[in-house]
Amino acid sequence: MKLASWNVRTLLDAPGRPERRSAILAREPARYDIDIAALSETRISAEAQFEEVGAGYTFFTTGQPEGKPRQAGVGFAIKSTLVSKLQEHPKGVNPRLMYMKLELSHGRTAVLLSAYAPTMDATEQDKEAFYNSLSDIIRSVPYKHRIIVLGDFNARVGRDHSAWPRVLGHHSIGNENSNGSLLLQFCAQHELTITNTLFQQDNKYKCMWMHPRSKHWHMLDYVITRHRHVRERYFWLLMKCHRPQHLHWHHTMTARHSDYCNVFKQYIQLQCDYT
């Protein structure tokens, strides 16, 4: 099963646009044959479900209540052929968190989370509320279940592997900022590993966001899992960022899937009974 994480900026349609933004967006995961994409900054109010028949994806989103500013918003784009095989649909927690369950082979279960963390400009109260909600979800997942957190954390985690040996690998980039410190502390508390930092490759395959003024690329979108599951035989992780064609997107798409032959992509091999 191929998974991806993508900050799409918005799923809202602009006046005069000849084609729905969701239809345009759905063609990108289809191009890479992604099974499930975790989406952030969707900006769609309340909870919604809709299908893009042409591309073959069904969208599940959650956002701010109706009538409030359309900020944040998260969701999943799932291949429509898989939706009927899910035991339950994704569930929204708040405008920044949504989760879903996958039944794996050999009786295993994985919980996928789509996350969109507050930006650097957000208040400390908003940041604390986000990590408290995320902590509640992590604690509620049974010990034996696999956890995969995908999303835009608006955080630079730096390269200090010696300070965070079970959280960071040897191949991170950039310098740590205050949001990165929050994420590192959260991961250490829950024994989680930021898998993007585990693999040696060119920075162009690690960076997902370009600063609009400096034009420097940064790593802000992460795929995070429990440390004890990183080296499991069925759970291989490699990485590549795919830069969508034809459109200017805020972030590139971080894709993960299970093709052992292509070592240049970012993978999660999930052996699912219904794929």
Image: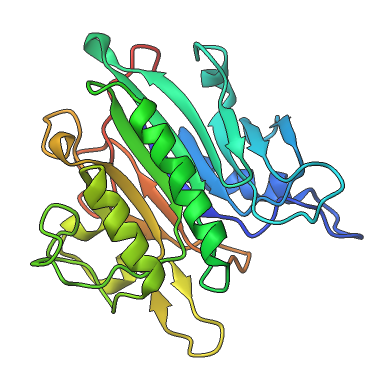
Compare residues 203 and 161 and report the one nearer the observer: 161
Compare residues 171 and 275 and report the one nearer the observer: 171
- Kindly indicate the quadrant of the structure image that contains residue 183: bottom left
- Kindly indicate the quadrant of the structure image that contains residue 109: top left
The residue drawn where x is 55% and y is 60% is: 125
Whole-percent x and y of residue 4?
A: 43, 44
Whole-percent x and y of residue 182?
A: 36, 61
Query: Relative to 176, does residue 199 appear above or below in the rendering?
Result: above
Whole-percent x and y of residue 235?
A: 20, 33
Quadrant location of the C terminus? top left
Query: Relative to 12, does residue 87 appear above or below in the rendering?
Result: above
Compare residues 137 and 258 and report the one nearer the observer: 137
Number of numbered discs visible in the structure rendering? 0
Q: Residue furthest right?
A: 16
The residue drawn where x is 26% and y is 9% is: 107
Whole-percent x and y of residue 101?
A: 43, 22
Compare residues 153 and 260 and report the one nearer the observer: 153
Q: Residue furthest bottom?
A: 214
The residue drawn where x is 91% and y is 60% is: 16
Quadrant location of the N terminus? top left
Whether residue 255 appears in this view of the structure is yes
Q: Left or right: 148 with respect to 36?
A: left
Whether residue 33 appears in this view of the structure is no
Q: Left or right: 25 with respect to 173?
A: right
The residue drawn where x is 15% and y is 61% is: 164
* Colour mode of the rendering: rainbow
